[in-house]
Image (cartoon, rainbow, N blue to C red):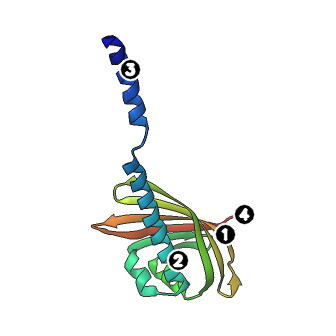
Amino acid sequence: MRRASWLCLPVVAMVALTIPSAATAQAKGDELTKFRNRETAVWESVKNKEVESIRKVFQKDYVAVYDRGILGLSEEIDGISKLTIRDYRVTDVNVRNLDPSTVIVTSKVVVDGDANGQSMSGTYNAMTVWQRSGNQWYVAAHTEIKAM
């Protein structure tokens, strides 16, 4: 009888190790919510053309990749003045941790707006790289492409 209980112990241990704890699931949910809120805040700042808010959250060596080219922070800020975003919705947010200080956030963004007088309305697949410095998170890179 004693041998049977020892034989079951490895199976129980393997099952316990493969089931994520409630605390781990809660932490992942909290992280998803935080980064969804960060992404939405950036889109809201762009919509409202809040340049100073954007400068505070973007790294100085920020880079963006769009169909129109590879942009740095100053070009990105200049481009915001040419945008009119009437409405947007951030959906399907996913967070991937590269390391404790670097996170990739992917999402879909439905936009109703214009750029340089041309419609840019539609659904975009977006990716943002966030990096932590101290206790603050900053946008290091962003790209988006219109979904087909």
**Is residue 121 rendered to the left or right of residue 63?**
right
Distance from Cα at disc 3 to Cα at disc 1: 52 Å
Q: Please rate how many residues cluster around mark 2, counting C-alpha atoms within 10 Å: few if below 14, some from 14 to 19, many from 20.
A: many
N-terminal label among 3 and 2: 3
N-terminal label among 4 and 3: 3
Secondary structure at badge 4 equals loop
Q: On the image, numbered disc 4 is attached to which residue?
A: 148
N-terminal label among 1 and 2: 2
Secondary structure at badge 3 equals helix
For residue 27, say whether it is visible: yes
**Is residue 108 rendered to the left or right of residue 28?**
right
* Image height of 106 relative to 115, above or below: above
Classify residue 81 by image quadrant: bottom right
The residue depicted at 36 percent of the width and 29 percent of the height is 13
Residue 64 location (% of width, % of height): 51, 70
Residue 46 location (% of width, % of height): 52, 82
Secondary structure at badge 1 equals strand
Q: Please rate how many residues cluster around mark 1, counting C-alpha atoms within 10 Å: few if below 14, some from 14 to 19, many from 20.
A: some
Secondary structure at badge 2 equals helix
Q: For marks 3 and 1, give the one nearer the viewer.
A: 3
In front of the other: 144 or 26: 26
Mark sitting on residue 63: none
Distance from Cα at disc 4 to Cα at disc 3: 52 Å
N-terminal label among 3 and 1: 3
Q: On the image, numbered disc 3 is attached to which residue?
A: 8
Q: On the image, numbered disc 2 is attached to which residue?
A: 43
Residue type at mark 1 is Thr
Q: Please rate how many residues cluster around mark 4, counting C-alpha atoms within 10 Å: few if below 14, some from 14 to 19, many from 20.
A: few
Q: How many marks?
A: 4
N-terminal label among 1 and 4: 1
Q: Are marks 1 and 2 in contact (CB under 8 Å)?
A: no
Q: On the image, numbered disc 1 is attached to which residue?
A: 123
